[in-house]
Image: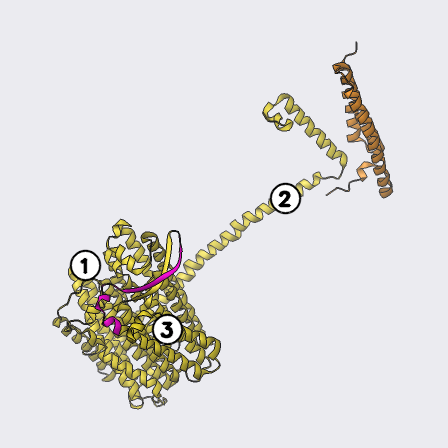
Chain colours: A orange, B yellow
Amino acid sequence: MITLAHYMLLSAVLFAIGLFGVLSKKNAITVLVSTEIMLNAVNLNLIAINKYIGVDGFYGQLMALFVIAVAAAEVGVGLGIVISMYRNKETISLDEFNFLKW
Amino acid sequence: MVEFAMHNAWLIPLLPAISFAVIALLLWPWPKASSTFSILMILTSFVLAVAVVYGVYTQPELIEKSMVYSTRWFSMPGLRIDVGIMLDPTSAMMLWVVTLVASLVQIYSLGYMEGDPGFSSFYAYLSLFAASMLGLVLSSNLLQMFVFWELVGLCSYLLIGFWFYKDSAREAAKKAFITTRVGDFGLLIGLLSLQLIFGTLNIPELAEKAVNFQNYVSAGTLTLVLVVLFLGPIGKSGQFPLHVWLPDAMEGPTPVSALIHAATMVVAGVYLVGRILFLFKAVPTAMHVVAIIGGFTAFFAATIALTQTEMKRILAYSTISQLGYMMLALGAASLTASMFHLMTHAYFKALMFLGAGSVLHALHGKAHIHEMGGLYKKMPWTTWTFVIGALAIAGIPPLAGFWSKDEILLVVKEAAHEAPGIYTPLFWLALVTAFLTAFYMFRQVFTAFFGPEKPENHPHEAPWNMRLPLLILAFFSIVGGWVGLPWLEKGFGYWVRMGEFHHAEPDYVLMGVSVLVALAGIYLAYLMYLKKAIDPDKVAEKFGVLYKLSYNKYYIDEIYLWFNQMVVDGMGKILYWFDLYIVDGIVNGIGAITRGSGAVLRYTTTGNLQTYALVIFMVIVVITLYFAFGDASFASLFLGGGK
């Protein structure tokens, strides 16, 4: 019997993996991928809650669709930034990009 | 004419003020025109003043109740300041003295200041001074008086420093101004306190309220206020310990010394105390302070005058001494004696100053009496008028000084019946001072005018416009005291007084004693300086320390300098250090802390986005933990609501 807790646990694990990727990877593409993992963890959560809590309607699914759309747009923007970074510095390693440094 | 003058007394100060403005704006390129216009104006004032004196003379009711024309200057809730003119015998007498001396000095200056590059501005200043002094005399309100008080101080400053290309003149002007400002500060505090206590500064209203002042203030507080207020007169009238500026003020042109530093401005302090004498009468302690300061100053300045060698300085110390007499008379609660002496002193001291000016003029600025001698052959007019002045100040009857000085001795003697502990020593001090006065005056006369001739000097008699004032003043020095003869039924004391008129019997013993004292002083001077029976140098040696003290003016100036260097500059050093290290240290410290923390914290801005994200994540973890295990009310801060 799979309960809501299992889904949420999986979601938390996915989120943590994504967060770890975002915080520790040097490759900008990998960071973007990790972001997607985090977003998908959230989507999983939303849909699971929508199913198990059983409110009438499909708000969770709707939210998930929203998140997917926003994530697509965000990846578009993110890749654009990554490309412009590459044009500037001939690399996409994140620790080379410290323009905000003191 | 008399009616007109009485009702338009404000014209008296206004005319010289107009003269000042006109000279300063229009006439200054033409010295002759400036001086003529100025003299015309002051003479018109003089005529008006004479008319006022006559008008007051015909209205004895003014003695009890002054004629006051006043109008509102400004008012706000709880404060109303009037300005106006106040006519009574006292102010009428002052008007007469000031306009007379000012007119004569302006005529005298025609000769004395001839060819001076600042001739026109000199007349402008003299006019401004006359205007301010007359305004002070007529003031019906103490604040108005204070305004004019400061104005005469300003004119004094301008005129002492008139020859500003001389270092000494500049220094003297600054010294005069700053020293009197010290006193003026006390005066201002006193006036503010009076306004706070009585709610008015109009002199007639103050007089009414002073009768039962206990309704407003305790006697101790009023005493304190009056003593602080008395600092003003101490500064302006050159009383100890603020007397140091007056001898230095002799750096100005001699007519200025005669007008301002002998006859008019320096008596403003005496006049102010006289105007509010009813307050001093209400609290005897304040009166005693006035009497003690006055009596001590009289004696103190006379002892300095004994050994000075510059003609004008001797006269300056003599002025301080005589002002001390006036203060002593006020301290003995006698407006009459004080004002009487003020009037006669104005005559003979102005006369002697103008005489000294004539000598300086003839000798081209030689000031030391030992450099003079035998002047009586070449300058008979100057010499004999000067001798008249010296006799008058020494107190030889029937000249003016005798009557007024006797009056002072008499009132002090009478006051000694009331409070012997205070006034008896003062009486003897005053008597000794009379002896000293006669002595040092005739030391000067015998040395400068009758001593052996100095062949290197080629003195010449002064021109007519310098002689005329000398003659007129000599005349008044002789007869000026006769208005106050003790045998008169309604003499000076009947007119100028405060409170009940009591006709004192002539005190023949006192008269005899004071004449003897004066003659003794003159005789001693004669023995020492004319007959050479006693060698002055031996006397000086005998008195050793005392001579040195007197010759160096008791080192008061040095004490002030020392005080200034040690205490004031020392305080300055300490405060400077405090400012430099503590105050600036706090300010700079705040800056340094900011910069230092910035220097440390800037390493947190790595520019690495992932680091920032990690920090955000950590903080979220902390907040989450706090929500889980911490205080619920704190959580509500983040969740909104706060209920």
Q: Nearer the viewer, residue A102 or B4?
A: B4
Instruction: Determine if the magenta segment contains residue B56.
Output: yes
Q: Amino acid at mark 1?
A: Gly
Q: Which residue is mark 3?
A: B130
Quadrant in the rendering for residue A36: top right
Does residue B9 appear anywhere in the picture?
A: yes
Give the percent coordinates (x, y) of residue B186.
Answer: 36, 59
Q: Are marks 1 and 2 on the same chain?
A: yes
**Helix, strand or loop under label 2:** helix
Q: Is residue B380 above or below residue B332?
A: below
Q: Which mark is residue B596?
A: 2
Q: Which residues are magenta?
A: B54-76
**Label 2, residues with CA under 10 Å away: few <14, some 14-19, many ≥20:** few
Q: Nearer the viewer, residue B559 or B235?
A: B235
**Label 1, residues with CA under 10 Å away: few <14, some 14-19, many ≥20:** few
Q: Is residue B264 above or below residue B363?
A: above
Q: Are marks 3 and 2 on the same chain?
A: yes
Identify the residue at horizontal 44%, vertical 59% (top origin).
Answer: B569
Name the residue furthest top. Answer: A1
Q: Which mark is residue B421?
A: 1
Q: Amino acid at mark 3?
A: Ala
Give the percent coordinates (x, y) of residue B555.
Answer: 34, 67
Disc with the residue nearer the chain's start (3 vs 2):
3
Residues at badges 1 and 3 in contact (C-beta under 8 Å)? no
Give the percent coordinates (x, y) of residue B618.
Answer: 70, 29
Does residue B450 appear anywhere in the picture?
A: no
